[in-house]
Image (cartoon, helix red, strand yellow):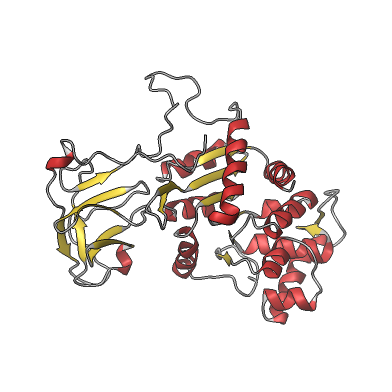
Amino acid sequence: MNPLTIYQPPDFASAPLSESPAARLIPAPADGIAPEQFHATSNFPEYIKLESRGWVLAPESRMDAVLVAEHGGLRVVEPRNLRKGDRVVVGRTENGEQGIFVHADGFTRPEESTDKFLFRSRGTRETPFSRSYDDLYTVLRHDRNHGRIVWVLGPAVSFDKDSREAMQGLIESGYCHALMAGNALATHDLEASRFGTGLGQDIYSQQLVPLGHYHHLDVINEVRRAGSIGAYVEQANIKDGIIYACEKNRVPYVLAGSIRDDGPLPGVVGDAYEAQNAMREHARRATTVIAMATQLHSIAFGNMTPSYRIEVDGRVRPVFFFIVDMSEFSADKLANRGSAQAQAILTNAQDFIVNLWNNLKT
């Protein structure tokens, strides 16, 4: 089965959707203020019935935005980015009663059981993930040339020699079109390139190196002296690692800052809303997301990412979101924040990335 072809649109010709009224549109009363009873989006496909065009699928959707009608179509906007007079869709029902239909079942696999009682209906540490891996291989091979693959990485990937090499290989082979991370991933990856350590531990033997706890601080200082990460990669003759691969292959990356950051490295976006805007540019274009070993960045990026994408030919395809973590908590937290399409693979980050590379590099 090709996982890219599964979408069942609603039947708008049959009741009750055929009898739905057009959605109400109320002007935003001021910049950054939505009208009362505004409709807040999910990341499911959402249809709005417009007076002039009938049912229209929103071009994208994401958690907690609003829909603005303009030029016969729809635009998805964060409430803080509204402008006075924008015609905002209002209504709090989602089954067509107010011209709003949230299509939560558009990507249901036909072979999925409809039984009311099921064992192991949710991914846990007992779940076998063979099918998840096979689907992921298929999707990544397709999206390398026909989509946009975005990775959201925590620093754990940079603490191991094999996982760094595997991630570098994936980037260099076209399996990464953008990288989202924080200060720590870049810092410790450059530390590994410069000193062979991660937080002062040898990235192969995991043995502590004398005065190794200074290494990441020295790297931050050197990069700040160089003026940018790109300049440091050149000046220090860096020849391996995740950041090196991004710089070498011109893969864009966004480093979103944290209140606990050391340094930080130049290029780290310290303003949370600027970081959100920068990350959202990639979330809106993503067709596959792999979020690994970073709970807060995974939840944030998941909330920005639609569950679907409308192709040039009008076909609606799913946007795949895989969360990789050793803990069920992170996967559950992401689902509980609205990213219902997120598929969990519960395993060690290093094992996952090495296994992925071993299957894709042939």
User: In the image, what residue occupies the spot 36% across and 39% down?
Assistant: 106
Percent of width and height locating residue 61: 36, 54
User: In the image, what residue occupies the spot 82% across and 61% down?
Assistant: 212
Name the quadrant containing residue 113.
Answer: top left
Percent of width and height locating residue 297: 53, 55
**Residue 338, relative to residue 311: is it above or below?**
above
**Residue 304, relative to residue 104: is it above or below?**
below
Image side of residue 249 versus residue 333, left or right? right
**Residue 116, relative to residue 12: is it above or below?**
above
**Residue 35, relative to residue 222: is it above or below?**
above
Image side of residue 235 versus residue 70, left or right? right
> Is residue 61 in view?
yes
> Is residue 151 in view?
no
Name the quadrant containing residue 193.
Answer: bottom right
Percent of width and height locating residue 163: 74, 50
Name the quadrant containing residue 116.
Answer: top left
Count of all numbered marks drawn on residues in the image: 0
User: In the image, what residue occupies the spot 78% across and 61% down?
Assistant: 192
Image side of residue 202 versus residue 39, left or right? right
Percent of width and height locating residue 316: 39, 48
Nearer to us in this view, 362 or 209: 362
User: In the image, what residue occupies the spot 46% across and 70% down?
Assistant: 274
